[in-house]
Amino acid sequence: MADALTRLVVDCRVVVKWKIPTEDHATAVEELLVDWEHQAVEGAVPNHFQSEVMSAFLCAYRGDRITADEAREAIGDLLALPFVLYDVAPLADRAFAIAQQYQQRAYDCLVQ
């Protein structure tokens, strides 16, 4: 029987580092990418992930960390990856309550 695949919820800040190796801690997240490429893990992201990726690369471009062409290429590459998308709407009320209780950002509290 095959081992169960580990599913990880991947933060946008992690995948940005896959494309901008000069970012802080970029080498630390490289191992996750290698694990994914070897199908040791499966990446799951909230359904607003695509807009987060676009925004992150727009900020990197505006901050002169990458060119516009590099940003467009990175966005295309990352949005083509086979992430498992999950809908955050059913989790919104619970995420709000957790965020309120623990003084956190709501999107960091999206848990099932």
Image: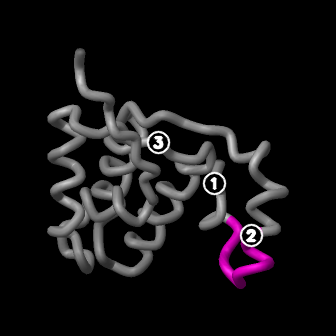
Q: CA distance from mark 3 to mark 1?
A: 12 Å
Q: Among all residues in the image, which is located at the extreme front?
A: 1
Q: Residues within 10 Å of mark 1 (few under 14, many from 20)?
A: few
Quarter the N terminus occupies? top left
- Where residue 4 sits: x, y (%)? 32, 29
Residue at (19, 68) in percent of width and height: 28
Residue mark closest to the camera, 2 vs 3: 2
Q: Determine the image quadrant of residue 60.
A: bottom left
Element assignment for label 3: strand
The residue where tag 1 is placed is: 111
In the rendered structure, which amino acid carries the disc numbered 1?
Answer: Val
Q: Is residue 13 left or right of residue 94?
A: left
The residue where tag 3 is placed is: 44
Element assignment for label 1: loop
Q: CA distance from mark 2 to mark 3?
A: 21 Å
Residue mark closest to the camera, 3 vs 1: 1
Q: CA distance from mark 1 to mark 2?
A: 9 Å
In the rendered structure, which amino acid carries the disc numbered 2?
Answer: Ile
Q: Which residues are magenta?
A: 98-106
